Amino acid sequence: MLNNLAERILRSEKSAVARGISLVENESRQAGELLKLLYKNTGKAYLIGITGPPGAGKSTITNSLTKLLREKGFKVGIICVDPTSPFTGGALLGDRIRMQEIGNDKDVFIRSMATRGSLGGLSKKAKEASEILDASGKDFVIMETVGVGQSELDIAQTADTTIVVLVPESGDAVQTMKAGLMEIGDIFVINKADREGSDTLGVALRTMLHLKMTKQSDRQVPVIKTVASKNKGIDELLDLIMMHKKYLEANGKLILKRKENLLKQINELVNNRLENKFWTSEKKSTLSSKLDEISSREVTPYDFVDELFRNVN
Amino acid sequence: MLNNLAERILRSEKSAVARGISLVENESRQAGELLKLLYKNTGKAYLIGITGPPGAGKSTITNSLTKLLREKGFKVGIICVDPTSPFTGGALLGDRIRMQEIGNDKDVFIRSMATRGSLGGLSKKAKEASEILDASGKDFVIMETVGVGQSELDIAQTADTTIVVLVPESGDAVQTMKAGLMEIGDIFVINKADREGSDTLGVALRTMLHLKMTKQSDRQVPVIKTVASKNKGIDELLDLIMMHKKYLEANGKLILKRKENLLKQINELVNNRLENKFWTSEKKSTLSSKLDEISSREVTPYDFVDELFRNVN
């Protein structure tokens, strides 16, 4: 049954890929087995992370970039990680319609992963979904993440090339720096560059990236302008991605980067399993029966956790 | 020694409070013991979370709000959670200078907690720091978080009242929704409201919040305009905070909310401890010796993790 699913994923059947990602998303027991079967067929896709503040036009860039990759004959998988609110229920209609257009292509697979409910393990799940797309023969997997928080940054960082998308209105560059985006970008895009302020932002970004370079890297991080809605600058963006790919491959950095990501992945697998193993139904009921006492400060949460651990083993 | 430190914290000595938070921040063994000693003296401070996208003016609002709380005779603790980049090294100079002014007041305590290096447990640490400030007799503890990612949202949500700060340029309200901010705000602030677009944003926010209310709440979430740099609207903001406080206290919701936060806190304490316990030096060295095989896809990370767990107990 799982062998059959794995084979169908390797043959790139859309319904099988969708099923595989659902297993991952639902943290099904079968997911681990499926990933084991597929693992030796992974590592071929090149992972592109796209992140940046809300409203920067990441979806539009993903869309234009995908079209261009398709024109060049590459197969593309897309994972949109979306901290969607429960009451709006999913991706925005506009994005969805835009995406549907490319999604009809048999060599493009798009999947949204929302943070609905439990957030734990989202970057684990996104990584595992990318492995399924990788095994299904996609040449490029794009991970698009909304927001500039740590979980989104974590996901973007599992990519081989991380693109940070900003807009002239993203606030002064200093604020961008504060949000931790400066560290993770391999390529910076100033989108909606036909708006006022794009030159100022460009100069500020370059200055800061130059400072960074002299400190810790042998590669100048490029900054380019795009107007993704008009398809402007997308060719140049793809050229920069390809240059970064070559740079990583030429000096063994790609292997190193992927090893670091592997370490993170193993850590998350371990944490996930530890947590599931620890919270037996017995411990859960101890917690609910003691919560009032902790809440009224008769028992401290620190002593309570000590107690939980005394009963382990 | 720790008893002495605890007593000095209860007497609100700044140097002791600083030392206590450092223990928490460095995950010292003594931190847990200190928090146990202080726990029965906590639960008195009212926690205010302030979050929103970079550049929205959160620091300025924190600053103005603190001054106003001081005028009314309240003691204030401030924790700024700042995903600062390693190469810029800390808070922005402007923020720092502004903050220094209020920080000289003996009844104000300000502490920045950066996400430098390991990010795990940041919300655990921030929560523990707020307990120390609480025990030291602060009437209000403000937790200011930069960014709109999940870790920042988690921190903001440990507060009793969560304030989401936006600016007219925050992008259309739809994008805000996408960033998951709509769920967590008890009060929405449109700061820099003298700029163009604040009315449009206000209407859009109110419409969405109204939708939300009809679905799941008995309270209309207020939206107000401020110009924090000119101290405009800060009185109204404090009134809204006090109204929300009364609302929570009147119908038992505060106790319920704090119980939920307690559950999260216990979860984080457990995860932290599980992780530290699991990664013995033996397991760490197994990992480094096997990493190459996993990286070259001879062994899958899933089988490797299975193996690690077989050796547990």
Image (cartoon, coloured by chain):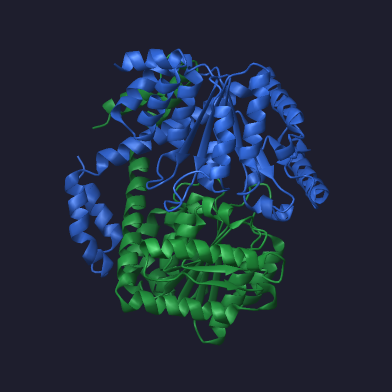
Chain colours: A green, B blue
Whether residue B121 is situated above or below residue A205 in the rendered picture: above
Q: Residue at x 57, y 60 (%)?
A: A52
Q: Residue at x 38, y 48 (%)?
A: B117
Horizontally, residue B161 falls left or right of residue B173, namely: left
Whether residue A107 is situated above or below residue B138 in the rendered picture: below
Whether residue B292 is situated above or below residue A148 in the rendered picture: below
x then y, percent, for residue A149: 52, 50
Q: Residue at x 43, y 53 (%)?
A: B87
Give the quarter of the figure containing the C terminus of chain B. top left
Residue B159 can be seen, yes or no? no
x then y, percent, for residue B239: 74, 25
Give the quarter of the figure containing the N terminus of chain B. top left
Closer to us: B120 or A86: B120
x then y, percent, for residue A202: 59, 67
Horizontally, residue B153 falls left or right of residue A230, namely: left
- Residue B248 picture quarter: top right
Image label count: 0
- Residue B33 picture quarter: top left
Closer to us: A53 or A143: A53
